[in-house]
Image: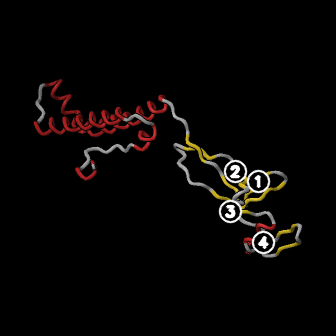
Amino acid sequence: MKGRIENGNIKLYKTLPEVHRGAQGVVLSFRKASKDVLEANGYFDVIKPSFDARTQEKSGIYWNEEDKVFTYDVTDKVFTDEDLLNVKLTLKSEVRRKCGEMLKDSDWKVIRQVERGVDMSDSDKQERLNILEECDRLETEIEAIDNYIDALNYKVQYFPTEEEEI
């Protein structure tokens, strides 16, 4: 991508014109012109820095005289405790929803036991206990997160294997 200052504004070109009429005359096959010819006619590279839109902001494009390029600055966003709290609440909500889904298949057994006194099997009780303990573990992990970026990068992992915990 190239950029050029026209009438005091930066104009970006994804595709260069095939023909350019400038102070130095007409240049045919302008798209294929050398870097020197492009720059002599005011067309310079546009450098797009990489950035994480969740945690950083990109400024408006500007001309960098020293490097002879058009570029953007990247700055870190400032996050508040409320931002962290909102991400943590979203993560906990996701955990609770997933745990509810995992418990759903045996909920009827709990209701049957409470309403009619029909005992659940020990394996069903243990499976539910494992799910509930895993949900508690995840909520505790989430609650311990103390900065926004770590909260954004947190991946909810149910029943991780030993390799995944490392």
Q: Which of the two discs, 4 and 1, sits closer to the camera?
A: 4
Q: Quadrant of residue 69?
A: bottom right
Earlier-in-chain disc, 4 versus 1: 1
Distance in Å between CA atoms under marks 1 and 3: 13 Å
Q: Residues within 10 Å of mark 4 (few under 14, many from 20)?
A: some
- Residue 50 location, x and y as percent? 56, 54
Identity of the amino acid at label 4?
A: Val
- Residue 161 location, x and y as percent? 24, 50
Earlier-in-chain disc, 3 versus 2: 3
Q: Which of the two discs, 3 and 2, sits closer to the camera?
A: 2
Q: What secondary structure is found at the residue carrying circle 4?
A: helix
Residue drawn 20% across the image and 28% down it: 111
Earlier-in-chain disc, 1 versus 3: 3
How is the structure coloured here? secondary structure
Please give the residue where the numbered disc 2 appears in the rendered image.
61
In the image shown, does 131 or 12 lie closer to the viewer? 12
Please give the residue where the numbered disc 4 appears in the rendered image.
37
Identity of the amino acid at label 3?
A: Met
Earlier-in-chain disc, 4 versus 2: 4
Residue drawn 42% across the image and 39% down it: 151
- Residue 75 location, x and y as percent? 59, 44
Using the image, determine if residue 129 lies above or below residue 162: above
Earlier-in-chain disc, 1 versus 2: 1
Q: What secondary structure is found at the residue carrying circle 1?
A: strand
Please give the residue where the numbered disc 1 appears in the rendered image.
10
Name the side, left or right, on which 65 lies relative to 164: right
Name the side, left or right, on which 52 lies relative to 59: left
Task: Tell me, yes or no, whether the two marked residues, 4 and 1, touch with CB atoms within 8 Å.
Answer: no
